[in-house]
Image (cartoon, rainbow, N blue to C red):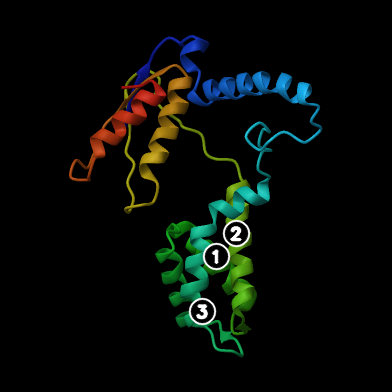
Amino acid sequence: MIFWKKKKPTSDSNQSSVPQESSGQETRQSDSTEPLTRQAGQDAQPSSSQTPEAPSNKVGWFRRALQKTNEMLRTDIRDLWKSEGELVDDDFLSNLYAILIRTDMGPDMATKIKDSIHDQYRARKVHQEDVLRIIRERIAETLKSKGGSLNLPLTKPAVILVVGVNGSGKTTSIAKLAHRLTNQGKKVLLAAGDTFRAAAVEQLKIWAERIGCD
C-alpha cells in the first residue's frame, strides 16, 4: 500500500538514481583504457564491457514481457486441439477462458481475447496458431496503449491498495508507483498489507531506501 501527501519538489540531486552513478564509473573506465589502446596501436574494437549496450527495440521488449505467458499458453492450450482443428462453441470458449486466467491474464484481457475468437470463428473450426495469433495481437495492442492517469486528491492523503496472486509483480509495481509519485514531489509511505508474507516489510524497506521515500 502507498500513502502520500503533497510536499515541495525536491532538488534534482535527490532524484538522481543509482544507474547514473554506475554510468559514470563505466565512463571513467573507458577513459583510462583508451590511452593504453592507442599506445599499443591496436585497431581492434572495444571490448563488450566498454561498449554501451544498444537500447532494446520494441519487439525485444515485448518478447521478454510475454515470455512466461507464451510458454504457459503453448503448454496448456495444446490440450484444447485436435489435429484437424477445434469447433468454436461455448465449451471451447469456456475452457480457453480458464486457461487464459491460469496464465496470469486479468479477466478483462481474457474476456477481450475470448470475444475476439468468438467474433471471428464462431461455429467454425479454429487451429491453435490462429488463437495464439489473436492472443499476441490483443496483448500487443494493450501494451502499446497509453496507461491511465492517477487521479489522486490534492487536499488529503490517499491510499493505493495493491492486491494480486503470488509472483504477479505486486512489489515491483508498488516500487514503480512510489518512484513516480516521489518524483512528482509527493510524500510517499510504503506499508505492507500482508505481514505474513516472508520478508514483506524488509523488501519494502529496501525499495523505500532506493526510491527515497518512507
What amino acid type should be assigned to the residue bearing mark 1? Ile
Q: x, y (%) of residue 125?
A: 61, 85
Q: CA distance from mark 2 to mark 1?
A: 7 Å
Mark 1 or mark 3, earlier in chain: 3
- Check disc 3 and report the residue beneath it: 78
Q: Is residue 23 above or below residue 44?
A: above
What amino acid type should be assigned to the residue bearing mark 2? Arg
- Check disc 2 and report the residue beneath it: 138
Q: Residue at x 53, y 24 (%)?
A: 22
- Check disc 1 and report the residue beneath it: 113
Q: Is residue 86 above or below residue 160?
A: below
Q: CA distance from mark 1 to mark 3?
A: 17 Å
Mark 2 in CB contact with mark 1 (< 8 angstroms) = yes
Q: How many marks?
A: 3
Label 1 environment density (alpha carbons within 10 Å; few <14, some 14–19, many ≥20): many
Q: x, y (%) of residue 23?
A: 58, 24
Front residue of 87/10: it is: 10
